[in-house]
Amino acid sequence: MPKKLIILTRAAVFCLYLSLLCPAEATPAPAAKGEAGRQHLVFFRGTPQELAVYKVRGRQDGPTVMLLGGIHGDEPGAYASADLYADLVPRRGNLIIVPRANFRAVLQGRRGPGGDMNRKFSEVKSGDPEGQVVAVLKSLMAESDLLLTLHDGSGFYRPEWESEQAGPNRYGQCIIADSARYTHPGGGPGSVKTLELEKQALAAIAKVNAEITEPLHKFHFFNMETAGDESLYREHRDSATYFALTRLGLPAFCIETSKNLPGLDEKIRQHNLVINAFLDLYGVELEAPGLYAAAPEFSHLVIRLSGPNGELPLALANGQTLLVKPGDSLEVLHAGASVQRGLLVAVDDGFASVMRRTLRADKPFSLTVRRDSRSLGQVNIDLLADPAAPSPQVSGQPATLYAAFTPAGVSASLDTLPGHRLVAELELADAKARADAEAEAARDAKSGEIVAFLLEVDGKPVAIKPGEELPVLHGSLLKLVDIRTAGGPLPKNVVMNLKGFVSRQNELRNTGEDRGATADVSRDMLRGHSAGARGEVYAINAEQGKTILAGCSIRLIRPALESVTIRLDGQTRVLRAGSRTPIAAGAKVELLEVALQGGHKLGKPRYTLAGHPVPERLPQTLTMREIAINLAVFNNDTLAGKVTWIPRQAE
């Protein structure tokens, strides 16, 4: 059996197994061939890992595209955009939509209460409850032809540093791939398939940028080269896209809109532009979704109360308080709201769903209604002060809001009881969720850990890790580009400071910020600020006020010529630095190569023959003079060494 078919079969069996364990909220019969259909599956219902999946089948066969949003709970543009596609029926092709992969994170508005879920696709630690969610997501990927993971990133990605908010250490407004071109084993023996990820991304970007007028908001392609030994993003090997690409041979992209875009509507719109561009490239035809703009509203909860009076279905308006007797049991049947997807009813500040769970009123509590991380309102449950009073009663709102739902024979009191506030005892305790949130705050801080300083030496990009030292030749031009972190944003007011250098932007007021500035290391460095005795070592620090968060250094090295290779009379000769070589006047000498001691390379090569400039591109053909002449080698304006040619009379 072909490998991919085996994967799909296992995925189908696994999905069926999970569906039996966690039956779907709405699972219509599969559509017949040629008919559109929709399935709404809910896995792990009633747990903090509750997962809603929407499978939409088009009227015509075509590729299946998976949209994965909400893997990070603090990126609302991502999950709100994915949510819109669950209501569509494609004319051609199919969709698998997971708007809120990490529902608990979405509810808390945090990156991930149980750790970064996007770092769990290669391996999940034993006992991690998010492992079951990751397993479902992997099985859904195996059913797909394209994976798009949706995110909101900081700032605006640019291949080169432009400003504090626009540079290579930012993630907004880009399409990320783990490779520009990837070859994966195919379905049959000896077959392979090549995925042109960069070409696909650039094609989508061309479509999207044609719709964006603001230059700062235009998209760029970001190749993380995740598998490379020199990659600065090796942690991405644990991500959803890397798993899909390397294990399933699935083209996979991260879509990052900027958190700095003006408002949620614009984030959603730009996510939609990118999604639609990829759907168009893959031949999936559908109507563009409308823009979610109206704020969600909550009106009432329908509650079934079990007590001495039997089972009573009640509707409590937002803000009302239901008064019951100690020991009464109740169950939330429905939340009346303008939206249903992403809706949660929890106890107090908890993050576990209590829909259709039996709650015992042993003490006062509150039923809080949230849509994603936003609180929409609450209904309060309190205890009657007089055990002999009729139950239930309601207070806190005008009686007319409740009277239409009040069963016959039950009185409604408008008195607000003093004292008790709304705390609940729930079978599913949220103490662990709060502890996880605190741990995640610490992990968020670590995600802003500095992992590299980005530089350019004579126009060539270089990354130095904290604590490392970079050799730089005298005469080189050193550009300070940016500071790269492990994933989170830098703390506020952090500057990138090259000690011993004052850029023009800081001549009047030295803020220490050197990002974007270029230093000629032979001329611009102040020896008094060197860490070395001879003025050869200079620190590059990430500074927040007077605190140094991380640092690296550069060591200036004098370029020393080792040899010059020439071709003369059809023979190749290597001339050592300082040597004197007889050459016939008028002879044509081909300059082939210049080598420096220590294996260093000239960053800004410059050559002169008898004091006159020689084109720097090699090889070059030179003519011997009738007098002794020097061929001098420079790095920019710093002399590395020379060889001398003396005239030899022609025979």
Image (cartoon, rainbow, N blue to C red):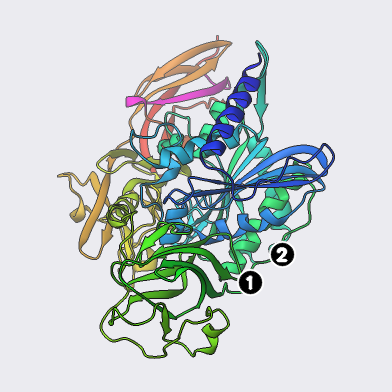
Q: Magenta segment, which residues?
A: 584-599
In this figure, what is the number of numbered marks? 2
Q: Which residue is mark 1?
A: 293
User: Which residue does the image show at 32% across and 86% down from the upper left?
Assistant: 417
Tell me: residue 610, above or below residue 205. above
- Crowd class of label 1 (few under 14; some 14 to 19; many from 20; radius 10 Å): few
**Viewer-proximal residue among 399 and 88:** 399
Q: Quadrant of the C terminus?
A: top right
Quote the CA–CA distance across marks 2 and 1. Answer: 9 Å
Q: Quadrant of residue 562?
A: top left
Q: Amino acid at mark 2?
A: Gly
Q: Quadrant of residue 401?
A: bottom right
* Residue 331 appears left or right of 404: left
Q: Quadrant of the N terminus?
A: top right
- Look at the image and tell me whether residue 615 can be seen: no
Where residue 77 appears, as percent x and y from the top left, is 56, 61
Tell me: residue 319, above or below residue 569. below
Are the two marked residues, 2 and 1, in contact with CB atoms closer than 8 angstroms? no
User: Which residue does the image show at 28% across and 44% down from the upper left?
Assistant: 466
The answer to whether residue 594 is magenta is yes
Q: Amino acid at mark 1?
A: Ala
Where residue 581 appears, as percent x and y from the top left, is 42, 18
Q: Which residue is mark 2?
A: 290
The answer to whether residue 417 is magenta is no
- Residue farthest to the left, as pictured: 533
In the structure shown, which secondary structural element does the residue marked by tag 1 occupy? loop
Where residue 335 appears, as percent x and y from the top left, is 54, 67
